[in-house]
Image: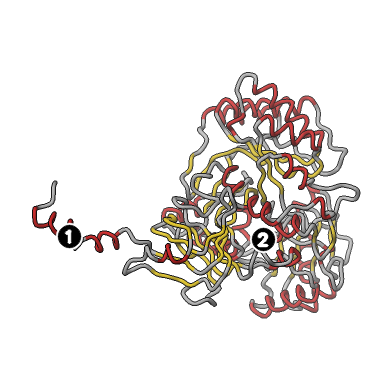
Amino acid sequence: MMPSGLVRYFLLAGVLLPAIATAQAPDLILYNGKILTVDSKFSIASAIAIRGERIVAVGDSKSVRSMAGHSTRQTDLSGRTVVPGLIDNHLHYLRGTDFGAYETPIHGITSRKEVLEKIAARARAIKPGEWIFILGGWHEQQFADKPGGFTQEELDAAAPNNPVFIQKTYITFYMNGLAVKAIAPAIPDLYKGGSVVRTDSETGRRVMYAALKYFPYAKTVEKRMDEVKAFNRYLNSMGLTTVYDVGYIDGSYEPVERLVKKDNLGLRVFYTLRYWAETSRTAIAAAEQIARERPFQRNNRFGQFGIGEHLYGPLHDTTNPGHVFSDEVYGDFRHIAMAAAKGGWQINEHVMLETTAKGMLDIADEISKEHPIRDLRWTLGHLDLVSRESIERAKRQGWVATVHNHVVKPVIKGEVSPPIRVIQDSGIVWGMGSDGTVVATYNPFHTIWEYTAGKIFPDIVKYKPEERITREEALIAHTRSNAYILFMEKDLGTLEKGKLADLVVLDRDYMSIAVDDMRNVKPVMTMVGGKIVYSDKKPQGF
């Protein structure tokens, strides 16, 4: 309906224009900062304006602040660096929600003394008899003051009244005397005395089951929701705003989905299709399931969209060059991969060895003759010992790539693993992830440090200078490239007008600090969709 003559008069006179402008004004402006947009030019701005859950302007402080209305909140960044929200392309997320609220993580701690003090502090904070759990994300090499595993005596001294159970990998565990007393009866054929139990993968599960029966699992969905929120806050505190869960058998997503409905998740969470394929018969069933279901069952907050990290369970290699798979195993993999190509599914595959990569790329060549995969962004993950030739071949086929955190893993002697400079120079789209929980830390700045400083904990040189990547390349890999890999480049990955307002304010200047300091970067504030999900509460206005 046209406005009345009087209203039209005042509109033309400009009387109502300020009210209209106020209605379109930003809700929040962050100014006087160093905004690393990570756009195609890696532009740097000083201010950003947000309305609702999206960015409405990025530019210089004067022009962006001129957009403010009466109700716009304005925050002086005092020169702090802002980066896009960090995306983890490979996190065993649901498994982390099970443990995150209760365990005592030691990610990134390079002092053995500090770890023991942390265990002692946890013991003081809980009741006698309650268990202390550390579940992966560390290595015996990482303690600069005294490398090596934990002795029963030092764990007894740190927590004399509480059982201490420390998982190092899926097959190695450390315990104090009270934990040994509780667990040893369940594993009499394994326990040989002392603090450490080393097993194979099958018997390692028995050790975990024996210990985890003492874990304080939530008994209701409501309590599980609290566990999820606690884990998400931990991830937010490290600057993570989006994660892709590639663990397909780790429990129920019901508590996560309930939090999404309440708009209280604080993180964007996406996960892979859930099925079980460990034999030729179950591979056929998996292919049939993939044919029945549709990919991309998600919105920009939550949902399922891909398959991985193992299309077919038996095709699971390690960095042991003895891993060579039979034609039958590759045939079962091909059956599932063909169903994925027909259905338009993205796949995310675990590939550590050159022989495995070659086998998968051969199959992709065959499949593409009937069902082109170029636009599906199939993903090769890990790439520890994959050649330049296979990486370039993967790029030609349309694959993308992901690499992960190794700061708590030994260097593979005589190998550049993964060949990060080669991957970067190949031109393939590639992104960074953690591979947390057990085998890696979740902290994205640890991963960035690994590939820019070329080191692993505590300060062991892994890459020669010419084998490393730049800080700009690393940040692109953890933001813009990961958004592309997740088919979310229109919404995430850069700080540009129209994108979702996922961002992180840092405690130091990412662009000027020494690369050796990258592992110490900490978020001051993390925002998801225009909402603050983490703040250290130090700066004014946050």
Callout 2 secondary element: loop
Q: Which mark is residue 435?
A: none
Q: Relative to 88, does residue 518 appear above or below in the rendering?
A: below
Instruction: State the residue lying farthest toward the right.
Output: 414
- Between 352 and 506, the residue placed more toward the observer is 506
Dot 2 corresponds to which residue?
A: 443
Query: Left or right of 87: which side holds 20?
Result: left
Point out residue 228 in the picture as x, y percentages from the top left corner: 54, 59
Dot 1 corresponds to which residue?
A: 13
Q: Relative to 539, does residue 35 appear above or below in the rendering?
A: above
Q: Relative to 1, does residue 161 appear above or below in the rendering?
A: below
Instruction: State the residue lying farthest toward the left.
Output: 5
The type of residue carrying mark 2 is: Asn
Query: Left or right of 367: which side holds 63?
Result: left
- Residue at point 67% right, 61% down? 443
In this view of the protein, can residue 468 be seen by the observer?
yes
Q: Relative to 273, does residue 131 appear above or below in the rendering?
A: below
Q: Which numbered mark, 1 or 2, is in the foreground of this view?
A: 1
Distance (Cα) linking label 1 and label 2: 56 Å
Query: Left or right of 25: which side holds 81?
Result: right
- In which quadrant of the rendered view does residue 271 lie? top right
Dot 1 surroundings within 10 Å: few (below 14), some, or many (20 or more)? few
The type of residue carrying mark 1 is: Ala
- In which quadrant of the rendered view does residue 377 lie? top right
- Between 522 and 205, the residue placed more toward the observer is 522
